[in-house]
Amino acid sequence: MELLEVKGLRKQYPGFLLKDVSFSLEPGYIMGFIGRNGAGKTTTMKSMLGLIAADAGSVKIGGMDFFANQRECKQNIGFVMGEFNCYLGYKLKTITKVTKRFYDDWNEEAYRGCLSRFKLDENKRVKELSAGMRVKYALALALSHNAQLLILDEPTSGLDPISRDDLLDVFRGIVEDGTRSILFSTHIISDLEKCADLITYIKNGELYASEELETFRSKYLLVSGGEAQLEALRGSLLGVKNNAFGFTGLIETAKAAELPSDIRTAPADLESIMIYIEQEEKAV
């Protein structure tokens, strides 16, 4: 059974439409949730969690209808959205004391373990913490009530590379036993290259892809060459950038047979795929 099942999620604003987004996540996986700013990632997450009212669609958490059973479903979700900027004047221990009352299965031992690992001092006030330490505190709360599904929106954006790498280790450990999963939205694509099993890609309010990360990457190749090769590939490239040595572009692997014999190719990383796909209207 999927931990998360989203079907036909739709939300319209003036000038923007989240159009019938559907994807699912089974236990034991980390799913990277990607797309450029304004693509609809945060709208999708907020609609999924009832923070804004979806116009259509359904969401199930552990097989249970989320919109009809929000209290029960939220017991099974750990949610971190961006930097922790609330209750700035309160001590962490005060916020924790209030927070844990909302969860039937609060795990004090897990919470204490998070405080130790993240080097958090409960007697500090939120305003005394750096941006990175605030994110770590939000994660400590999310990881302390035995949630099976963690939904994280830009959780590593305020962290230095060493702290980010430490958190990625935490994420991998969370899903290791095969009972829990993470939906992880970020613009730091290198983080997903290190830890994600699956990728869901939102483009202009629509689902572009939702599949295994390696499967997604294998569908594209980076190609580079000079003006003659570029002319030969006109109409086949998804995106192209000119440089002092000629050009670099992105092509579907399925079209590799069309490539000139003297063109250079390389595997496409996730960041490059996004960059070229997002500028495909400029492709030749």
Image (cartoon, grey):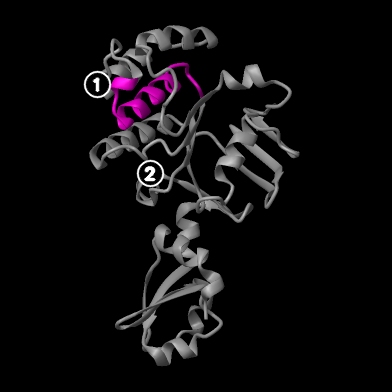
Relative to 33, say whether 148 is above or below: above
Mark 2 secondary-structure assignment? helix
At 40% across and 29% down in the image, what residue appears? 174
| Amino acid type at image mark 2 | Cys
The residue that disc 1 covers is: 119
Q: Is residue 134 magenta?
A: yes
Please give the range of residues in magenta: 127-147
The residue that disc 2 covers is: 195
Residue at the extreme bottom of the image, as rendered: 228
At 42% across and 89% down in the image, what residue appears? 229
Q: Is residue 156 magenta?
A: no
**As rendered, which of 268 and 84 lies closer to the eye?**
84
Mark 1 secondary-structure assignment? loop
Task: Locate residue 41, reporting x and y percent.
Answer: 56, 45
Quarter in which the N terminus is drawn:
top right
Q: Is residue 84 left or right of residue 169?
A: right
At 50% across and 68% down in the image, what residue appears? 279
Q: Main secondary structure of the magenta part?
A: helix
Q: Is residue 151 left or right of residue 128?
A: right
Task: Locate residue 61, reporting x and y percent.
Answer: 63, 29
Snapshot quadrant of residue 154: top left
Task: Locate residue 120, reporting x and y percent.
Answer: 27, 19
| Amino acid type at image mark 1 | Lys
Does any portion of residue 250 appear in the rendered image? yes
